[in-house]
Amino acid sequence: MTDGRGVAALARVLADESRATMCLAMLDGSAWTLTELARAARVSLPTASEHVSKMVDAEIATEERLGRNRYVRLAGQEVADAFEAFTALASAPAPATSLRGVSERRRLAAARTCYDHLAGRLGVAVLDAMVARDLVRVSAGIALTGSGEHWFTDLDVDLDDLRARRRPLARECLDWTERRPHLAGSLGAALCERFLAKQWVRRPDRSRRLEVTGRGEQALRAQLGVQASALRV
């Protein structure tokens, strides 16, 4: 059992604003170069290197060296889940000081990834629609219905493969902007993957922000009855 010293040591690693910013960036689930993390946190490369070393030592992040490059990512789904939950519990962020900052927050709130699954208003709306259409049930944790199994199979999701993994098939994840759950687990990751593969959503830049495409608007309406107008910034 972890004692208070271990918890305090981990909290000290996350207490630095630059390291916290790096963790938020890596919630997109991909590997970031040291240069990209330095740019995201607005620190120098040597400072970013020190921060990454501390996060790796604390087992919050992992790194891989390829030639001269260091590729860094969160240490896994459990770390991402813990950080997203911590973000949801954090106090309201300081007011944005620029129009760009306000716009970015609105875009993140509309649609983004939470590590490897859909989040923001999009993620919450998708889970709500799946419940309304009896694709999943949430009375005692999220469970697929028979209709849900057919729906995911039609999306080319291999449910047998997902069930064979050690990761939970489906679970709720508290959305830090909506303060309501979206779909996580291997099923949530597979759904996000299919949304991207089918070009229902796209990544417009090097962040975890998503945009619903015109094709996606049609698919959301036809498949789940979700009106994309409610998701726009």
Image: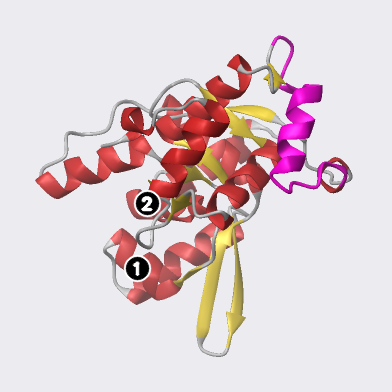
Task: Give the residue displayed 55% in from the left and 28% down from the top.
Answer: 224
Residue 21: assigned label? 2
Q: Which quadrant of the structure image shows residue 166? A: top right
Q: Which residue lies furthest to the left in this view?
A: 98
- Residue 205 colored in magenta in the image: no
Q: Which amino acid does label 1 sit on?
A: Ala
Res 129 seen here:
yes
Q: Is residue 38 left or right of residue 167?
A: left
In the shown orientation, is residue 102 left or right of residue 86?
Answer: left
**145 is within the stretch colored magenta:** yes
At a point 71% along the width and 34% down the height, the residue shown is 151
Label 2 residue SS: helix
Amino acid type, residue under disc 2 in the picture: Thr
Q: Name the residue under label 1.
A: 38
**Mark number displayed over residue 135:** none
What is the secondary structure assignment of the residue under circle 1? helix
Residue 61 placement, left or right of 159: left
User: Does 19 sit left or right of 127 as displayed?
Assistant: left
Residue 69: give x, y in percent of width and height.
51, 83
Q: Give the image quarter of residue 81.
A: top right
Residue 9 position, x and y percent, is 55, 44
Q: Which residue range is magenta in the image?
A: 139-160
Q: Is residue 228 above or below residue 216?
A: above
Q: Where is residue 41 in the image (x, y as percent from the top left)?
A: 32, 59
The furthest residue to the top: 139
Q: Is residue 91 above or below residue 28?
A: above
Disc 1 crowd, CA 10 A, few/some/many (<14, 14-19, 20+) = many
Q: Where does residue 200 sit, x and y in percent of width and height?
A: 49, 48
